[in-house]
Image: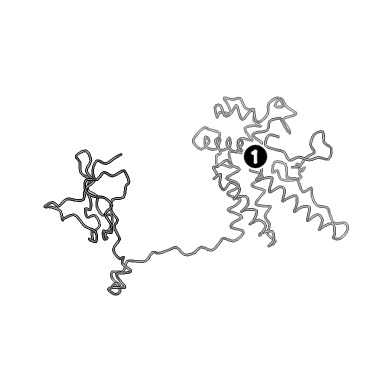
Amino acid sequence: MRVACCALLPPRSWWQPPPQVGDEVAAGAPVLVLESMKMETVIPAPFAGRIKELLVIPGSQVETSAPLVKIEPIADADEAESATGPVPSDEVPPGLDLPDAVAEPDARARAKRGLADLSAIVMGFDIDPRTEGAALASYLKAREELRAAGEDVVTDEIGLVALFADLAELSRNRPAGEELKTELRVHSAREHLHTYLQSLDVERGGLPDAFRERLTRALAHYGVTSLDRGPGLEEAVFRIFLTLQRSDLHVVTALLERWLGESATRSRGRGSGRAGAPGPRHPATLPRGGRSGPQHPVPLVRPAAGRPGACRCPSRGA
């Protein structure tokens, strides 16, 4: 946009004469007038100051954003105080109250917060891509501090692994366990989940009881206790879908790797002790289904098909 004309404020009966270099102007006082299409726009002083230089002359054309006048601010309150003396106490504005410095939480508190963040990631809640790995790194750091102090960390981590396992059970791409002995061996949990997502109704989808039990366990982690459709159920299913698509296996893998390493270290320590001491349980086992009483361990690491001696970690699709 090109302004047609720029002129110094003309002397008028209701205004003071146009300011000159060296004149002081108050904040908001008119300094210049821009004229365009027979319309005038008054340019006021943005702050109290002294005109240092006029960069335009009356009647000249100016471009958009072109500088018009230089105004030098008048001395601020600090300079005024040094020149006129201290300001009375009743006129001094109140200071800014800053919050007290908060001490860094201890390792236990940071570990608890870290587990909560990791649980939210596994459950499919939104995370900042810029800090995607920060939650895991922060927790592992606090975890090492707790282990160095001799505190137990595995007990709290079992809940996170169980959460991951319950969600992973919904996405198996082949029948497993008891399903192999029934007619359910034809369809996998993943197929049942895709059928359920079409209507969010287990009755309409004709889904088996085994899938309903798995779905109920997974929804319980989101506070949903009924399969009746509602806002809570829809939100939980949406999060389950997101986490199965995103696949946060690295979170649980990092914990399992440390369990294996720590168990191997304890095994070596026990081997150097007295003879006849009972050997440790297999470091990569968990109870089946969380049932009480005598249990057969379910290996988390099992031999890979066709590769004797090789092991692999089951994925969500296993």
Question: Which residue is drawn at the image coordinates 30% and 65% (left, top)?
Answer: 75
The answer to whether 263 is drawn above or below residue 202 in the figure is below
Q: Which residue is mark 1?
A: 166
Image spot of residue 292 (x, y percent): 71, 45
Q: Can you say whether 154 is above or below 92 in the image?
A: above
As rendered, which of 209 and 219 lies closer to the eye? 219
Residue 132: where, in percent of width, then height?
58, 46
Q: Position of residue 72 (x, y in %)?
A: 30, 60
Give the quadrant of the N terminus: top left
Q: Amino acid at mark 1?
A: Asp
**For residue 123, side relative to residue 62 (left or right):** right
Where residue 24 appears, as percent x and y from the top left, is 23, 61
Seen from the viewer's position, the closer of residues 84 and 302 is: 84
Please, which residue is most extreme toward the bottom here?
Answer: 85
Residue 186 located left or right of residue 1? right
Quadrant in the rendering for residue 123: top right
**Quadrant of the rendered image containing residue 305:** top right
Please identify the quadrant where the C terminus is shown: top right
Secondary structure under the numbered disc 1 in the rendered image: helix
* Residue situated in front as seen by the camera: 263 or 166: 263
